[in-house]
Amino acid sequence: MVKKATLIVICIFIFSLLLSACSSANVTAIEAPVATAAPATEVATGAPEVAPTTPANPEIILATTTSTRDSGLLDDLLPLFEKQTGYTVKMVAVGTGQALTMGKEGSADVLLVHAPSSEVEYMDGGFGLDRYLVMHNDFIIVGPEDDPAKTKDQASTNDVFAAINNTKSIFVSRGDDSGTNKAELKLWKAAAITPEGEWYLVTGQGMGDTLRIASEKAGYTLTDRATYLSMKDTLDLSILCEGDQALLNIYHVITVNPTLWPNANYEGAKTFADWMVSEDTQKVIAEFGVDQYGQALFIADAGKAEDAVK
């Protein structure tokens, strides 16, 4: 009987231990930390931009006209080129004559100029390796609104220059051997006039400064349309003559011949020249000025035949 009672007590004790162990296990399970999902990261909206590889010779010297600078076109183009290619452009804005001289002397890698006849001579002399048509706009004759020479009444550009000469009205010339100056002298020659006298003022300055002086002197001048429109609000000058085929203003990009100048950065120059005539860049050129002036300041021409530019 005693054995039976003892066995019962042992069984009760074992059962109690088992019950206690189960309770402890349940508590541990409840108190264990529950794993949570990691915070969601933002989904990328596009592939990250890949920075261009830095070229071995990353600096390019660009000799260009003051009109491409003063119009603001290069302010839009050069940062895009640098971002897309890894090159850095050092721009030297001078007259086309000076730019071509820089090319002849090996002081520039690439040229952006607008004096076709002088450019052809440059290429024939072996100073340039590649020459591409980029764009055009036009020259215009501007002057005081009261138009003392009555240029608005004239039938042609030749007649306009004759009227200015006959009335000895002030005419302000750049006189800097630029593409614009070359075009102006060609127009005087076509009108069979040699401009001289107190009425004919020579600034030796770029287009922007020449326009400001013409405005101050109430004089006439020849300018590219882009620079005039970009400065119009600061000038007392109106467009008095436009649309003549003789006023066409064509721009080309030219690489300096590395055979003559081995230290020239031809790889960079060619990259710039190719970029200027690329489809995307031509689109930027074609749209430049539309938002601000209601019209494009340049017509994109890459791929066209020279005689198709009008």
Image (cartoon, grey):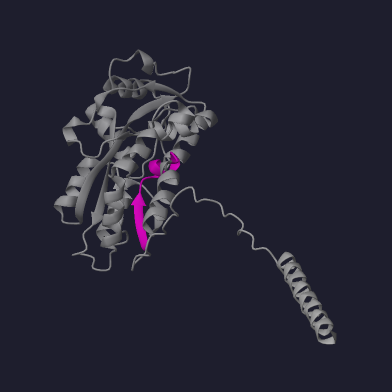
Q: Is residue 265 above or below residue 110?
A: below
Q: Nearer the viewer, residue 237 or 126?
A: 126
> In the rendering, at what x and y percent does residue 216 appear?
52, 32
How many labels were placed on the picture? 0
Please say whether residue 108 is visible from this viewpoint. Answer: yes
Identify which residue is drawn at 40% across, 33% down: 226
Which residue ends up furthest to the front in the rendered image? 1
Membership of 293 in magenta stretch: no
Q: Is residue 292 above or below residue 134?
A: above
Q: Residue 236, how many percent across, how many down? A: 52, 26
* Residue 68 counted in the magenta span: yes
Quarter of the image for residue 299 reads top left
Residue under the image location 22 percent in, 63 percent down: 258
Which residue occupies 28% across, 51% down?
273
**In x, y percent, where is residue 79?**
44, 50
Q: Position of residue 111 (x, y in %)?
A: 30, 51
Determine which quarter of the picture holds residue 180. Answer: top left
In the image shown, does 192 or 159 lie closer to the viewer?
159
Can residue 193 be seen here? The reply is no
Say which quadrant the N terminus sits in. Answer: bottom right
Q: Which residues are magenta?
A: 59-72
Is 171 in front, or is 272?
272
Q: Quadrant of the C terminus?
A: top left
Q: Is residue 20 above or below residue 273?
A: below
Could you say which quadrant of the image residue 147 lies in?
Answer: top left
In the figure, is residue 221 to the left or right of 96?
right
**View extreme (left): residue:** 124
Q: Residue furthest top?
A: 153
